[in-house]
Image (cartoon, helix red, strand yellow):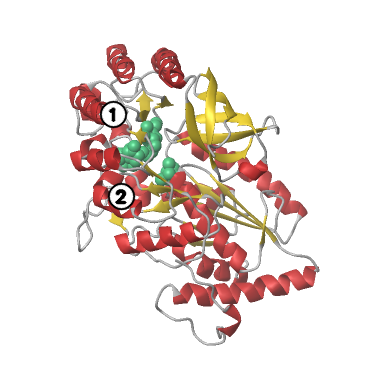
Amino acid sequence: MFNKIDFDHIDTTQAPPEAEPDRQYYFMAKCRKYVKAKSERLGRPLFSAVRTFGCQMNARDSEKLTGILKEVGYEITENEDADFVIYNTCTVRDNANQRVYGRLGHLNSLKKKNKHMKIALCGCMMQEPSAIEKIRRSYRFVDLIFGTHNIYKFAELLATMFESDRMVADIWQETDQIVENLPSQRKYPFKSGINIMFGCNNFCSYCIVPYVRGRERSRKPEEIIHEIKRLVSEGVVEVMLLGQNVNSYGKNLENSITFAQLLYQVEQIEGLKRIRFMTSHPKDLSDELIQVMKESKKICRHLHLPLQSGSTRILKAMNRRYTKEQYLALVEKIRKEIPDLAITTDIIVGFPGEEPCDVDETIDVVRKVQYENAFTFVYSKRTGTPAAAMEQVPEGVVKEGFDRLLKVVQETARDRVSLLSGKTMEALVEEVNEQDASLVTGRLSNNTMVHFKGNASLIGQIVPVYLKECHGFYYLGEKKDEKR
Ligand code: SAH
Ligand code: SF4
Ligand code: F3S
């Protein structure tokens, strides 16, 4: 956890310390001087915007970047017409990359109007040599590029950028470092993501994540517990434990510990009300975890259990290491133990070699499991992954399968979500509704969203809500008065 540092007492005329995180505190102190001098010259504060693409992991990384930007003296804004803009990128599917390239053109036009503007790129896409090459060639106005492994050096890189008038690029292939005690600025005061592990060792044959995020590394349980306790003391009531495969948490630690044991420890933290986690690989989901979830009062009634495909043949080619039957048996076991648990999933359509009969198998699983929600993706070829070298499915065939699957996903989800109609359940209020300011939006323990009359004063509170009308994936509801 980050304790306030007195940056004015760090002597930046001396050489920087070698040890982390002190080295980064030194560079934060240095950056503060640069930002202050520039702001005085311009006679106004300097503004900075961080834009996040991709998953929860990236969202949490962006909070860390924002925390550092705030410490060094930037005012934080969402407006990209700012003095420093950083894009934290994703490369899981090609459309994520295309969005970044598209937005960069817009940033360039803003930079032409504000000559003080600096632009940085970081995140998963930067770990791909082809992306770096393209940026060096066609996007020369970018000032700073770094990757996922050296993100903890952001303050140091920022200082280098201030001292240079050329593009600064620093990309590492790997790291075994986990640097604790750096600042972060949370997006929501009442909930927070917590990294419990980094990287992935699974190498699903379609997936780029292991290549851009490196090997699996778990944080020590005491660091995690300490961080959550601190968050709770600051008002956080819900945490989301983050990892590409949380079920293999702890395996590489000196004192090995299972994910279920970690959850048990988190459960004991006083003042914490809700625990979520993401993502669970079906092959590693233990009976111990099911028991801990069943007995817990705080672990939310939601499990995200990516299926990817319902065809055993395709699952094998995907290197997922379970069969259709094993997946269904696992779901049956979980549902028997925890009947009110919502299960959501991820599915890919169009993996190399997939035929309409394989999509039928996937649809069969969707019908049997009755997911509360399923994220369906069109397969995207990622350079360097084993699946990229396999024979690709024609676009028309993919689209036909995708539309067929989506229809069933929507029908079954609606049926399943509507089972709660007429019940009163607790919702954590997250925000004022974007479309209708007389409504607030809350999340049930099972992750379903509900919109109901209310105002901003309810944000961060857990309140009982009557679930009146089911609209597919969400509800319209009414807040019930609390019991006296
Ligand atoms: N670690 C998580 C997933 C992270 S990526 C897990 O194992 O479940 C999130 C989702 O993106 C994956 O579940 C998968 O459905 C999808 N995805 C990953 N690579 C993809 C690709 N090449 N094309 C399409 N979808 C992909
Ligand atoms: Fe990708 Fe598979 Fe790792 Fe998930 S488990 S991040 S899908 S390689
Ligand atoms: Fe994207 Fe990286 Fe997450 S590739 S999905 S941001 S781990």
Q: Tell me where residue 141 sits by quadrant.
A: bottom right
- Could you tell me which secondary element the residue under label 1 belongs to? loop
Q: Mark 1 points at which residue?
A: 390
Q: Name the residue under label 2.
A: 263
- How many neighbours does mark 2 have within 10 angstroms: few (below 14), some (14-19), or many (20 or more)? many
Depth order, front residue of 258/121:
258
In the image, residue 306 sits, relative to residue 401, either above or below, namely below
The residue under the point 41% across, 17% down is 402
The quarter holding residue 47 reads: bottom right
Secondary structure at badge 2 equals: helix
Taking 154 as reference, is 27 above or below it? below
Residue 404 - label: none
Q: In this view, does 33 lie above or below 443?
A: below
The number of numbered discs placed on residues in the rendered structure image is 2
> x, y percentage for residue 203?
27, 41
Q: Which of marks 2 and 1 is in front?
A: 2
